[in-house]
Image: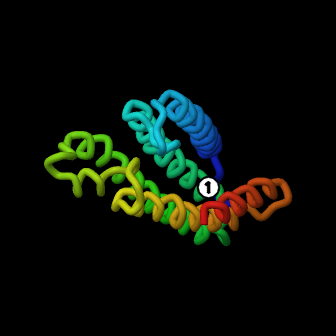
Amino acid sequence: MSEWTQTDWRFGMWSATSASTIGVVYVFVGLIGVVARPPSPDGLRQLDLYLAVLEALIILSAVALVIMMTAVYAYAPTDRKTFALTALAFMICSAVLTCGVHFASLTVGRQIDARGLPLLSHQLSVNEDWPTLAMSLDLLAWNFFLELALVCAARVFRSEGTRRVRVSMTVAGTLCL
């Protein structure tokens, strides 16, 4: 194994815990947003306030996941560094895409008058009906790059003591697909 430091371990644990906590908060805010919205035929459409909070949580989650993958890279034994570096590269791709989409939606998407530029407003929204450019890029981030990152990262953990991590990452990555 390479030089695995206490700082590496702390960063890994902090980022994994943060990503999990943000995920739980995301589900909670999403449920509140669904319950708080006025009755409509579109049951999962979020109110703007809740959607903005969800988008900010996604950005925070992506940052935590990149930090987690840097810790995986630091942990990786020399003969598994390629898997770890590949996982980090795919996670960075996922984070850049999703952060770009949600930041654009939080900033530009909310400034556009939907009546004046309805097509642009629609394409920058992750809350509109499929297909939108924003939604397709977000799906690429979360259902392709994240999946590849998790499956590659799982290959780093090969000892019996890390079996749960390996299985969890493989299952999560497979479910992303």
**Image position, residue 112 (x, y; %):** 19, 44
Residue type at mark 1 is Val
| Residue 56, x across and y down, in percent | 42, 38
How dense is the environment of label 1, judged by Cα within 10 Å: few (below 14), some, or many (20 and up)? many
Q: Which residue is mark 1?
A: 72
Residue sitting at x 18%, y 46%: 115
* Towards the viewer: 102 or 118: 118
Residue lying at 42% horizontally and 54% vertically, measured from the top left: 98
**The quadrant where residue 174 appears:** bottom right
Q: Residue furthest right?
A: 160
In this view, the residue in front, 15 or 120, is 120
Residue 14 in sight from this viewpoint: no
Image: 170 above or below 38: below
Is 175 left or right of 34, judged from the image as shown? right
Q: Position of residue 156 (x, y in %)?
A: 68, 64
How many numbered marks does the figure carry?
Answer: 1
Is the residue 111 above or below the residue 78 in the image? Answer: above
Q: Nearer the viewer, residue 43 or 30?
A: 43
Q: Nearer the viewer, residue 69 or 27?
A: 27
50 displayed left or right of 162: left
Q: Can I make out residue 133 in this image?
A: yes
Vertical arrangement, residue 141 with respect to residue 4, above or below: below
Q: Residue at x 21, y 46 (%)?
A: 114
